[in-house]
Image (cartoon, coloured by chain):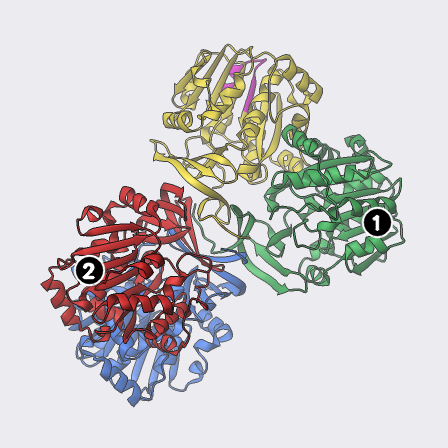
Chain colours: A green, B yellow, C blue, D red
């Protein structure tokens, strides 16, 4: 292999495992109140947003992640009018939400204003027009506070949050107490969906998010998709008290996308079936974990 | 991230992209007539077989690769009696083939005797008992020669070959001329299956293997699965003139596995559905490629 | 070791040896007509100028390299009035030359105007005021052409050139034919000095530069100094027909620096003695090499 | 650069700086009671002994380190009969000591028996015949205990110890209290010499070792030499109450080596002058540090 590049972004998954992405340039770097924010231009993934050394989104495949996160919840609900996005500073989660003409209000709560600013300046392909949309309300603040203090109701809540790391800001947003409050807000017909770490890198954390949501919601399903820039399969969990995500048929997905006139690059009926059909060994493992995360005994993702 | 390891296996996918796996030991290393053969013990993947710097199989997830390669073909056929494996030096492809009691003869043709020897000594979990099985016939030789000179007929042919690299030994085994000869050998009711490079790393190569097989076989399907130690989705193509792999239903897969009393860790009906449901953007790309590989104009995988 | 950085500059000395420097930012990058020009900000070396992936100068220790290259020649001559610098695009070699008030004209010939521009914009600590100095004449062009076509005479010629790589622009500037022309230009009393690659990384190349100069000049000496940002000992060769560099005493060096009122950070009598006293095994090796570089049989540095 | 190797030993000097050495094999690895002990075969340095991830000695250049550590002390003394080596598990320090026929007893105290065993098995070029020499007495134990409890007197004490890391076993062996006890043992005519970390990587630590020894001994000198496998200049400090190392002339060194009939590869008069002539900026820095290390306020090397 002839190495013609000399600048590398080295991302450690574990102390004994790392990925190296060749870089053309570091477009932007500064430390916000919360984290080290970088936009880098890579050879193989285009622009990458990197927070505290972790890949958040890449130009090449962010559409896979964001479509996988948003559409199953929107389609499961059927006609969402009010949507709450927790995290999602790049704006791409909102971008997918706003494709539904049924949406009247979309509130996004992100703790770090600088991520929004940097994304608007350097990553416009993720948020073009989104923050100017009259349906959007941007709240800079803590998602935990917002969820516990709001009096509003939402049809769909989408948790596009950082991982539940020890000492990090997000681990409380993966606990049974938090999910109970979310269940109140979405009510009997609403839908909650969350990123749920990687079922291949951190299977126990993924399984506990699923198990914890089962404590609260009647219908819960886990699914995942391979994201090249994460170099891992990435997991999600979807939950509702009124609608069973396991009963979503590929034909229904295609019909609904068509009905709402939604253009997607990744998501359709067959992609949905791919994601929701989970290989046997992962399925057996996830179903075998019987542990929940609570405020007193939170579960942290291994760093 | 606290790095407590100092020995790394660095695998370049492209000149601008690499993976780093922490190593405990290098168990074995020697250069055979054909290649550099290494068995290393890693922290996150157990033992790894590495040929010319490329991960072939890891203790942690080789079952995913080998089950994904073997079972769709065996199940599609229904009652294979004679099976030909091209490549597959570790013995794990044979291990899966021999689970079918209908199999009367399994011939394996691998060019490098040393890979077989090293695997038998250091990677017994992949080939325990396989080479002692009376149904097995091991041929050390060139797969191309074997296929063009044999007068035998096979129900299933499994190509577990190295990638079609320029200057490498394998690229001719991905051409339309080779596939025509394979079609003669498996006849109207037989099945051919081949590893087909990564649809995410080298999508064009993957698509051309599919397109080339469509030139020869009536029914052809592509599918893929994420392999953690490859840090990529890995692709396969299955082909037959008598049986349509796209019509294999999950329920049928589960019934057949049960009927043959096959124990698997990864493969079952739901895993089959996962693999054969291909995300939209990959599907559209693969179907759009209209190029075939021939002996005169072979397609090489970008190195 | 806790790794808190994720951006690395990886510099390969050989295909089996590399250095990794943690980067804060990539300040500048563009491809000129001749090469990839980068200015990066590192954690441990400050700003670094990198040409085609190779460290040229770092903020932390460029003074060591440039003082080691310039002062032995200037002091050996005693009262240089006309100085020719070949290469030296950063301007730091000129900076050292201009410290001598005896200098009336300093001509610098560099092939790549962009290196000069980028250095003037981003690396001002290396060239502050230099290019505005009335004594300086900057020629953008090929050093080989300049040397063979000039009718001027110089007291000191300083070769601050890139390494003699195969296919590169510089290897002809290390041949006996080139040195013969240089000897004509500096005459009986002048001094020639050249960077001479690393005596620890590429000892044969270093030795051949010395041996080739001995073919042409009466007095020749090799010396070296450890440069942290090169992570190697770096070598130089000094030559003259009228003055013997081996007879330069530390006390004389200190007296001359004082006499010219030269301020240095690295170079003085004791530093001179350190550089010109060469460890036994290197000395024996260098003296043992009996090969010269010619236009017809040039010697290339192993890449 | 064409990278044809896939196994790397990555050694971090700081969290933002590392070296990568290509490996052929990992010959030996086990964890002793004290540390991770590895013998690896590299492409560029031959066999390397690595303790807790740090290069200790390489086949290519261990002679430079060990000759630089031993001979200045032996020559300064003139006719050493009793020598104490602290650390030095590979045996190469003893190898150099035993070259002096004046030596009647050489005691070596190392805490980790396994380092001695592994070196005797895999690194015989460093200790061939040494441990069978009748003059040698090997003590497995703590150097601190030995020095404070021995009633013996020694002409030369050589400290070939690991660096003074926080939490490590060695930092007390760099304190003023320890040096006072050493001074008692060597008396008025004896010599003490110690490795003193890198003056380029950790200049403050190097300077404090020098400053602390000046608190105790009448004559103290620092010196250093570039060691390719350390990819750094490596420092030493020599001290005595009766003999001034700064007055050792190159001619005297050569005469003494000749007189004792000592064969060396690196060390001679000119190498001595190279090491003891310290570049100006390092010299000024080292002389400027006015801090000493004590048991109560030990100085740790930055990790």
Q: Residue at x 19, y 60 (%)?
A: D82
Residue D207 located within the stretch drawn in magenta: no
Q: Is residue D130 toward the left or the right of residue B213 in the image?
A: left
Q: Residues within 10 Å of mark 1 (few under 14, many from 20)?
A: many
Magenta span:
B181-193
Q: Residues within 10 Å of mark 2 (few under 14, many from 20)?
A: many
Q: Residue at x 27, y 84 (%)?
A: C254
Q: Is residue A16 toward the left or the right of residue A229 in the image?
A: left
Q: Is residue C36 toward the left or the right of residue D259 in the image?
A: right
Q: In the picture, residue A206 is in which quadrant?
A: top right
Residue B184 located within the stretch drawn in magenta: yes
Residue B221 placement (x, y as % from top left): 62, 26
Q: In the picture, residue C275 is in which quadrant?
A: bottom left
Label 1 to label 2: alpha-carbon separation: 84 Å
Camera-nearest residue between B2 and C159: B2
Camera-nearest residue between A225 and C151: A225
Residue B72 placement (x, y as % from top left): 60, 22
Q: Disc 2: which chain? A: D
* Residue placed under numbered mark 2 in the picture: D82
B50 in relation to B107, above or below: below
Residue D289 placement (x, y as % from top left): 40, 76
Mark 1 in CB contact with mark 2 (< 8 angstroms): no
D205 in relation to A231, above or below: below
D295 in relation to A109, above or below: below
* Disc nearest the viewer among 1 and 2: 2
Q: Disc 1: which chain? A: A
From where the camera sits, is residue B281 visible?
no
* Residue placed under numbered mark 1 in the picture: A83
The kind of secondary structure element at disc 1 is: strand
């Amino acid at each position: 292999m002839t190495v013609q590049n000399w600048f590398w972004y080295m991302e450690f998954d574990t102390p004994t495992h790392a990925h190296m992405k060749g870089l053309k340039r570091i477009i932007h770097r500064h430390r916000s109140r919360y984290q080290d924010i970088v936009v880098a231009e890579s050879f193989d993934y285009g622009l990458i947003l990197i927070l505290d050394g972790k890949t958040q989104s890449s130009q090449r495949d962010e559409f896979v992640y964001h479509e996988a996160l948003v559409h199953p919840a929107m389609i499961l609900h059927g006609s969402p009018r009010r949507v709450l996005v927790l995290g999602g500073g790049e704006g791409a989660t909102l971008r997918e939400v706003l494709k539904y003409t049924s949406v009247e209000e979309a509130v996004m709560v992100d703790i770090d204003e600088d991520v929004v600013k940097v994304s608007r300046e350097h990553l416009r392909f993720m948020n073009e027009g989104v923050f100017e949309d009259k349906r959007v309300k941007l709240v800079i603040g803590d998602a935990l506070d917002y969820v516990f203090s709001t009096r509003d109701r939402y049809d769909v809540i989408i948790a596009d949050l950082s991982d539940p790391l020890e000492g990090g800001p997000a681990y409380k947003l993966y606990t049974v107490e938090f999910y109970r409050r979310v269940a109140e807000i979405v009510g009997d017909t609403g839908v909650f969906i969350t990123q749920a770490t990687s079922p291949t890198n951190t299977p126990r954390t993924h399984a506990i998010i699923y198990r914890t949501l089962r404590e609260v919601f009647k219908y819960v399903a886990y699914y995942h998709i391979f994201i090249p820039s994460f170099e891992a399969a990435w997991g999600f969990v979807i939950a509702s008290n009124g609608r069973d995500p396991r009963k979503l048929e590929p034909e229904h997905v295609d019909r609904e996308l068509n009905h709402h006139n939604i253009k997607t690059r990744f998501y359709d009926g067959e992609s949905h079936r791919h994601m929701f059909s989970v290989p046997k060994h992962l399925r057996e493992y996830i179903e075998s974990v019987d542990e929940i995360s609570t405020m007193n005994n939170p579960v942290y993702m291994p760093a």
